[in-house]
Amino acid sequence: MITINFDKAKVITKERLRAERTPLLQAQDVAFQRALESGADTTARVDVKQRPRDITYLVDHATSLE
C-alpha cells in the first residue's frame, strides 16, 4: 500500500510552484519597472504579481491532496 506524507507533499508542491512562478514574476517585474519609468499606474501590476505569490499560501492551508 502506498501512503502519502501530506506535509512532505505540501513542501514539494510549494517548491514546484515557486519554480514555475519565477519566470512569470520576472516578466511582471519588467512590466512593473516599465510602468514606473513611464509614470503609469502600477496598481494592476501589483495585483498581477501578488496572485502567484498567494498560491503557496493556498498550499499551506490545503486540507486534501485535491
Image: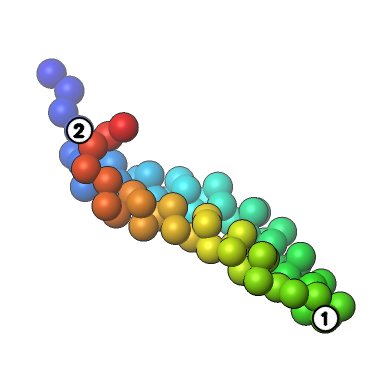
Quarter-of-image position of residue 3: top left
The residue identified by callout 2 is 4
Q: Position of residue 14 (x, y in %)?
A: 39, 50
The residue sitting at the top extreme is 1
In this picture, residue 9 sits left or right of residue 23:
left
Does residue 59 appear in the picture of this structure? Answer: yes
Q: Residue at x 20, y 33 (%)?
A: 4
In this picture, residue 21 sits left or right of residue 43:
left
Find numbered disc 1 in the image and state the secondary structure of the residue it sits on.
loop
Q: Residue at x 44, y 52 (%)?
A: 55
Find numbered disc 2 in the image and state the secondary structure of the residue it sits on.
loop
Quarter-of-image position of residue 39: bottom right
Q: Nearer the viewer, residue 51 or 25?
A: 51
In this picture, residue 44 sits left or right of residue 35:
left
Q: Position of residue 41 (x, y in %)?
A: 75, 74
In this picture, residue 59 sits left or right of residue 40:
left
User: Eyeballing the image, is 7 above or below 66?
Assistant: below
Q: Residue at x 56, y 52 (%)?
A: 21
Density class for disc 1 (Cα within 10 Å; few <14, some 14-19, many ≥20) is few
Quarter of the image that includes the C terminus: top left
The residue identified by callout 1 is 39
Q: Amino acid at mark 1?
A: Gly
Query: Answer yes or no: do the residues labelled 1 and 2 have beta carbons within 8 Å?
Result: no
Q: Amino acid at mark 2?
A: Ile
Quarter of the image that includes the N terminus: top left
Q: Nearer the viewer, residue 20 or 58?
A: 58
- What is the C-alpha distance between the residues marked 1 and 2? 50 Å
Nearest to N terminus: mark 1 or mark 2: 2
The residue sitting at the left extreme is 1
